[in-house]
Image (cartoon, rainbow, N blue to C red):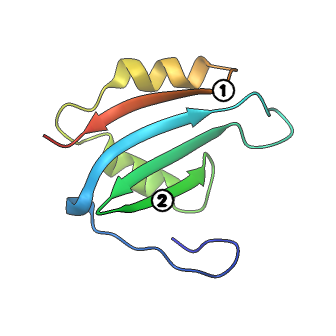
Amino acid sequence: MTEPNGNKIECTIGEIEKVLIVTTEDGPFYPDVWWTIVANEKTLIFPQGAKGENKLSDKIMNFPGFNFEKFMESMKCVEDMEFVCWTKE
């Protein structure tokens, strides 16, 4: 992932420890759904609709134990909330 300032943050799928969806009250004029991926002391945060999101989300949603109920709940949320969708066991 490349941040707006040009800093690159990288991790492998196997390094991912936790996946959260963070929602905000900022929509619809600003991004209001953010993927938050914690991996080996790194945190990758990117908005829904970011380039490459579909490819990565497809892989993440296939993780054993991915919580689709929490994911669907996050997609309906219009408040500032965090939804833990997956944690590495």
Pointers 1 and 2 in contact (CB under 8 A)?
no
Quarter in which the C terminus is drawn? top left
Alpha carbon of mark 1 to alpha carbon of mark 2: how far? 18 Å
Task: Say which residue appears at 79% left-offset and 32% top-offset.
Answer: 27
Mark 2 burial class by Cα count in 10 Å: few <14, some 14-19, many 20+: some
Task: Say which residue appears at 47% left-offset and 21% top-offset.
Answer: 72
Question: What x and y, as percent, mark residue 49?
Answer: 63, 49
Residue tagged by mark 1?
80
Secondary structure found at label 1: loop
Residue tagged by mark 2?
44
In this view, 11 is above or below 86: below
Location of residue 86 (image quadrant): top left
Location of residue 5 (image quadrant): bottom right
Question: What x and y, as percent, mark residue 17?
Answer: 26, 50
In this view, 2 is above or below 73: below
The amino acid marked with disc number 1 is: Asp
